[in-house]
Image (spheres, grey):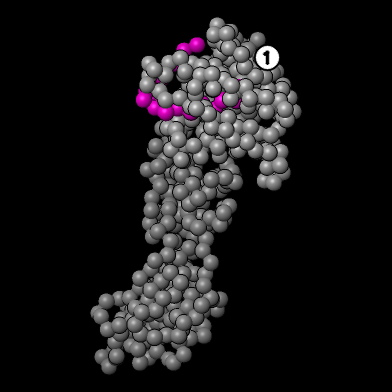
Amino acid sequence: MQCDLSPYRNKRICVALSGGSDSVALIDYLDAHKEEFSITLTAVNCEHGVRGKESLSDTAFVKKFCKERSIPLFLFSCDCVARAKRHKESLETACRNFRYECFDSLLREGKTDLIATAHHALDNAETILFRLCRGTSLFGLRGIADRAGYIRPLLQTSKLEILNYLSERGLSYCKDATNDDESYTRNAIRKHILPDLEREIPGATANISRFSAIAAEDDEFLYSLAREKVKRADGALYVSECEKPLFTRAALIALKELGVKRDYTQAHLSALYSLLKKPTSARVSLPFQIEAEKEPQGVFLYKKRERSELEIPFSTGRTVLGDDCIIIDKKKDGQAFDIKKLPAGCVFRFRRAGDKITKFGGGTKKLKEYFNDKKIPLRKRDFIPLIAKENEIFCAVGVEISDKIRTDQTSDVWYIHYDYKGEN
């Protein structure tokens, strides 16, 4: 069994040590080569509370193993059965989430540089087949890959190589009975589907695992191009028009920047792509209060905000309305208007149904129709400050002054400045 440890020289590596064959082989290999590569070695064991005494026995085995080799050990335990019920998730998912929370805590607290897991070629092939059958994208075909803080030194190593290594080194290890439980889909793939493939196509497992490395390279290249398609404007993200493979990746990058880490589907990404072919102002709603809207530059993505129903009596000086600061003074900047023509009882507010405006130059229109004519994005319309009396709009701040307060030679001229601080 050979592993390239040169990338991990001078690193602190913590091995996820269950006591099973794979993790025992990995930590033994690292322990045997730690001086050669100046590696500082530790281990972490997560007891899931699933297999009763057998699980506790595995943890005892790990403690003894680490004590005999003077390897520092971090221990965690959890009742994952109760956790699965509490979080309404499968037991397999609950156990995995618990483990990675433990691993992440060690990285976050600076107790190690890297977490090493003992995933091997068979695990990788199993994962790829599982995802493929569930309709994954090219990203899913990357299989089990390194990620920030995590390494998989055995990923291109076969199970047979691992077992031979254990035998050569005279190493004992624990056996997890749940690995034979075929109610877990992954176990069925490992015990039946992959062995059948190997019989029909020798080397299939290794070839599938190698394919994942090729898929990862191709997918990362596409993502590097897609990142160039994600832009910022007016405090929002947008994806410019491009080919679908790039667009869907760029949209996913934008969604993640907006905080959407889960609960999106390929259908959502396809719906976003379909917006490119629709007229301006077409919109799609996504999980986690994310809205997407077609604009001339491309598809804008932004978090939906609640519009304030607040009304503030009109006054000169500075007025804060929601995320906006409206300044009305004599400085010759902004929108000029005749303050004498503004009727008493005006307020600052946002738009409402039934609003109308007399356009500069004449002609009264519903505010909605006026915004349509001006091609103002839907995402902005609810957050444009207005000066209004009842349903009469005298100013859409930063957009239009009503003809009813236009200036002339006899006017008392004031100016409206607009300091917008919203996210959209």
Q: Is residue 174 left or right of residue 13?
A: right
Q: Residue at x 55, y 79 (%)?
A: 354
Residue 324 position, x and y percent, is 41, 71
Residue 116 visible in rendering: no
| Label 1: element kind | helix
Residue 73 coordinates in the image, percent (x, y):
53, 29
* Three-letter code, disc 1: Asp
Residue span colored magenta: 1-19
Q: Relative to the observer, which residue lies in front, 60 or 2?
A: 60
Label 1 crowd bin: few (<14), some (14–19), many (20+), radius 10 Å: some
Q: Is 219 rendered above or below residue 126?
A: below
- Which residue is pictured at 43% across the width and 53% down the height? 237
Is 8 magenta? The answer is yes
Identify which residue is drawn at 46% across, 72% down: 322
Q: Does residue 339 appear to the left or right of 183 in the view shown? A: left
**360 vs 7, nearest the viewer:** 7
x and y percent of residue 181 in the render? 73, 24
**Quarter where residue 397 is shown:** bottom left
Q: Position of residue 31 (x, y in %)?
A: 47, 18
Q: Is residue 350 in sight in this rendering?
A: yes
Q: Residue furthest top?
A: 168
Left or right: residue 356 compared with residue 78: left
Q: Which residue is mark 1?
A: 196
From the viewer's side, name the closer residue of 397 and 167: 167
Count the labels in the image: 1
Magenta-colored stretch includes residue 405? no
Which image quadrant: the C terminus? Answer: bottom left
Q: Please name the residue shown 54% across and 16% down the image.
A: 25
| 261 to 6, vertically: above or below | below
